[in-house]
Image (tube, grey):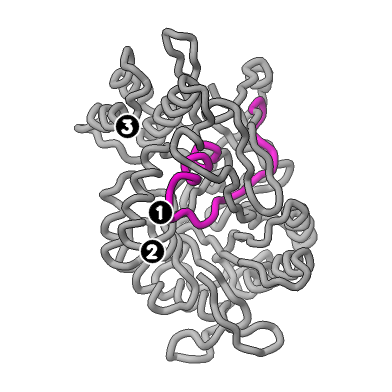
Amino acid sequence: MTTVQEWGRPVGDANGVFADGVVTVPIVMVDTDEGITGVGFGPHGGLDTVFAAIEGEDPRGVTALYDRMLRQTFKAGHAGAVFGTIGALDTALWDIKAKAAGEPLWRLLGGRDRRVPAYASGLDIGLTDDELVSVYQVYAQYGLRAAKLKGGLDIERDRHRLTLVREVLTEAGHGARPGLMLDVNEAWSRKQAVRHVCELERTLDLTWIEEPVRRWDAEGHAVVGRGIRASVATGENLTGLEQYRPLLAAGAADIVQAAAVWGVTHFLRVSALAHAHDVPVSPIGNTSVALLHAATSVPNHIVSELQDLQPPLGVSLDLYVEDGAFVLGDAPGLGLTIREDTITGFTRRSSSLTADSPNVRPEQAGRRLLAVTDHGPAVQRRPRSSLGCGPAQSDDGVAHPVRG
């Protein structure tokens, strides 16, 4: 089945915006012969083919079944939406395994602390200044003191919006410096990335820059990392350890990310690989409850993304947000409740593949010479130094150390 996330405002990134704020959320539900149902979120592409690998199997052997699903797609390949289908089924199997054990997944996986540190992520590129401030004031009320903004199209607009959010979080934190991140969703070339971030770092302390270049460009991420002071975060769109290895081998990722849609087993394996390189890991996604459970059990988790404060339509979660962290509950499995009657009764659906949606890469992405503004293109300012980024400066003109 498919439900929706109703944001009540535009959401998107440098590639496009869902103007109505309605985003589709596919759900997979797996039943067992003992009456246990597991739930996973993710695409349905190739579902019948992939499900054949686990049908009739004991769901408690979830990691072995994950590899069976990978083998099931051997000839056609498992990247893209099919990897999301595997991840959704894998998540449902972990849900079943924990329910069968009568434990929340975080405890089954060996987690000790049910609190998972969070940062705010508003998918906010389509918001006015007033709307942006209002959104992050709400996040701040839940104790969040780090924020990731969407940007990458205009240096000065990014600087202005980051400064607005910094002021909101600084005030909420009684003067404590907040964490600021910028996500550009693969919108830049290597040189654009270094130039844009260097200019921002003259007045802002960025914790990380996310997906500055194409997801597979290990050398490009390394080039960007050497040219800036912020950490480089990437990985949410990578599908399999074979795609992470070049990035880690090149020292190209300071923060390794994994998307909730790819499943629990994928996240655990990515975390282990990153840990072997002494790199922290951070889950990505809106309904990332499964990876929140898994994050409690890995030694290198740093922080998890918190997008909408409300769950998708027809979905209830056994968790809450308090003092800047997700707090997981004690319900067996993932603690998910699906109200099928609510979902099936909803008729309006978002079109996720329109040309102006975030899911379609713009023609000019990665090769823009001019900034994109509401009033037409504007020339981007050149950095004032040809020797790389100078010390990060606050608005008081004083250099400050950079986190990350």
Residue at the image position 56 percent from the left and 81 percent from the top: 401
Residue at the image position 38 percent from the left and 23 percent from the top: 47
**In the image, which is nearer the foreground, mark 2 or mark 3?**
3
Quick one: label 1 or label 3, which is nearer the N terminus? 3
Q: Residue 291: x percent and y percent? A: 49, 41
Which amino acid, by three-letter code, is at mark 1?
Gly
Front-lying residue, 230 or 103: 103
Q: How far apart are marks 2 and 1 (CA)?
A: 8 Å
Q: Residues at badges 2 and 1 in contact (C-beta under 8 Å)?
A: yes
9 shown above or below 131? above
Quick one: label 2 or label 1, which is nearer the N terminus? 1
Disc 1 element: loop
Disc 3 element: helix
Q: Name the residue under label 2.
A: 253
**In the image, which is nearer the foreground, mark 1 or mark 3?**
3
Which amino acid, by three-letter code, is at mark 3?
Thr
Which amino acid, by three-letter code, is at mark 2?
Ala
Q: Residue 207: x percent and y percent? A: 54, 69
Q: Name the residue under label 1.
A: 235
Q: Give the range drawn in magenta.
A: 288-315
Residue at the image position 45 percent from the left and 18 percent from the top: 30
365 shown above or below 20? below
